[in-house]
Image (spheres, rainbow, N blue to C red):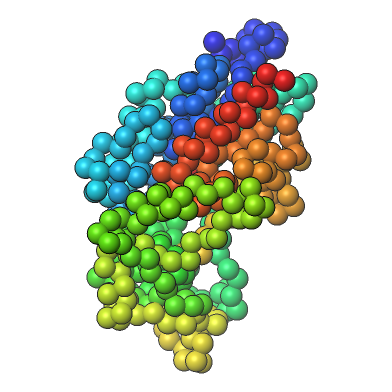
């Protein structure tokens, strides 16, 4: 049983085996394996439900993997195997997952900071609670700190500059001149959706490359799985998995871009007060620029523990901290494989981390 420090006047006898920070898919998959291992643990979630960041993603988001390849461990995604789950279905699935396994998620518990010492961790939340644990899994998500590149003239631009994480639906963009920056899945999905309502260009450093969703009649994820590419442990050969530079062509995107709606243009070089200055020197008025330019690591609760590099990256191998014994990660991009930060890929990483925790606790 979990007891608050202060209420019992000494907490060592109530020390948990593990605390998981974050109740999204990474935290829940970790919880599944911690429970199977018979460990005494708690999942602390900042929000009011165990659904991760999915409610914040844009309304029309559809998973790029079909239901057959979109499950967390122990509970198949409840949808026809070849259909692609929608955002709200993922939200429902995560909620059901936490309930099905009765995972001990404590909501409205945003972790503020961690104290390392005496062979474990004190986890302090904004609500003022303090949890003592022997090991810690950071599963707080890789997509919380939007990255906006700095470009000349941005300060004087009179339109709106957004990050793709601000985009929810096309209504507020009706009839606007919009430039979407980036050549990944998010930029292409957003640009194509907006192009039905607005005048949209996709601004790219290099042309968008597409991966067909189906090869020889089978979904791409079938091939990723049977070839072993999806789960290949790049860390074992001392390399990072290659970042995906091609876009899953889920919605006839290639055809729409080839037809010029949205059109694809070489990245603009600067902002002007009214719009953008394209690479060929042409100045064009623009209302809104959306940067789909990724995210940077954001683990503020670990600052001061020595776990992070100077640029805030967690220092780890395959999710095991190289700096702080007993500290682990689940859900980092490219943590162990190409699929680490996906619904389908997070389970194997969680399993691996919990195996390490079991060994650590037996020392
Ligand atoms: C736009 C977009 C589209 C994507 N599409 C797909 C897709 O189609 N298929 C796919 O498999 N993957 C997709 N992903 C990648 C990935 O599956 C999701 O980002 C997923 O939400 C990651 O889950 P997570 O549990 O690692 O992190 P999150 O979902 O971010 O969950 C982390 C949780 O930790 C909590 N938290 C954070 N800080 C604290 C704290 N200090 N204390 C307590 N709790 C905290 C947060 O509230 C959150 O609930 C997409 C990502 C993005 C951004």
Identity of the residue furthest to the front in this view:
227
Point 48% across, 41% down: residue: 346
Estimate the x, y position of residue 209 in percent, counting from the top left: 42, 72
Q: Is residue 279 visible?
A: yes
Residue at the limit of the structure toward the left, as seen here: 80
The answer, for residue 303, to whether it is visible in the render is no
Q: Quadrant of the C terminus?
A: top right
Of the 4 image quadrants, the one containing the N terminus is top right
Q: Nearer the viewer, residue 338 or 278?
A: 338
Number of labels in the image equals 0
* Residue in the foreground of this view, choosing between 352 and 321: 352
Q: In the image, is residue 104 above or below residue 210?
A: above
Camera-side residue: 219 or 138? 219
Residue 192 coordinates in the image, percent (x, y): 31, 69
Please determine whether, in this image, residue 271 is positioned above or below residue 39. below
- Image coordinates of residue 252 in percent, x first then y, are 26, 68
Task: Give the residue displayed 65% in from the left and 24% down from the top.
Answer: 359
Q: Residue at x 31, y 72 (%)?
A: 254
- From the viewer's perspective, is 272 left or right of 71? right
Between 162 and 307, the one nearer to me in the picture: 307
- The image quadrant that residue 249 belongs to is bottom left
Q: Is residue 81 left or right of residue 231?
A: left
Report the side of 137 relative to 344 (left or right): right
Residue at x 34% of width, y 23% of height: 100
Quadrant in the rendering for residue 69: top left
Residue 58 spot, x, y in % from top left: 35, 54
């Amino acid at each position: 049983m979990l007891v608050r420090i202060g209420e019992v006047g000494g907490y060592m006898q109530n020390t948990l085996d593990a605390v998981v920070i974050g109740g999204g898919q990474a935290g829940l998959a970790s919880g599944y394996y911690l429970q199977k291992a018979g460990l005494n643990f708690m999942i602390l979630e900042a929000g009011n439900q165990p659904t991760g960041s999915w409610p914040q993603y844009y309304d029309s988001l559809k998973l790029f993997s079909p239901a057959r390849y979109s499950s967390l461990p122990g509970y198949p995604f409840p949808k026809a195997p070849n259909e692609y789950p929608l955002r709200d279905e993922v939200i429902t699935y995560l909620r059901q997952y936490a309930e099905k396994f009765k995972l001990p998620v404590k909501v409205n518990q945003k972790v503020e900071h961690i104290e390392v010492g005496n062979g474990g961790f004190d986890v302090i939340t904004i609500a003022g609670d303090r949890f003592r644990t022997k090991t810690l899994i950071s599963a707080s998500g890789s997509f919380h700190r939007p990255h906006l590149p700095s470009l000349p003239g941005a300060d004087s631009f009179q339109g709106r500059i957004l990050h793709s994480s601000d985009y929810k639906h096309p209504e507020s963009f009706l009839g606007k001149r919009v430039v979407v920056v980036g050549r990944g899945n998010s930029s292409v999905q957003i640009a194509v959706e907006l192009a039905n309502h607005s005048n949209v260009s996709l601004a790219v450093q290099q042309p968008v490359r597409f991966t067909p969703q189906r090869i020889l009649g089978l979904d791409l994820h079938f091939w990723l799985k049977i070839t072993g590419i999806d789960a290949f442990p790049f860390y074992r050969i001392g390399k990072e998995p290659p970042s995906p530079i091609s876009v899953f062509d889920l919605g006839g995107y290639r055809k729409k871009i080839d037809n010029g709606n949205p059109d694809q243009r070489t990245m603009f070089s600067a902002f002007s007060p009214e719009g953008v200055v394209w690479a060929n020197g042409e100045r064009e008025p623009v209302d809104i620029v959306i940067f789909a330019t990724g995210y940077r690591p954001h683990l503020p609760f670990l600052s001061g523990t020595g776990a992070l590099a100077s640029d805030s990256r967690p220092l780890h191998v395959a999710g095991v901290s190289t700096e702080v014994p007993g500290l682990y990660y689940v859900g980092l991009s490219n943590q162990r494989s190409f699929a680490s930060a996906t619904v389908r890929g997070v389970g194997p990483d969680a399993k691996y981390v919990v195996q390490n925790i079991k060994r650590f606790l037996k020392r």
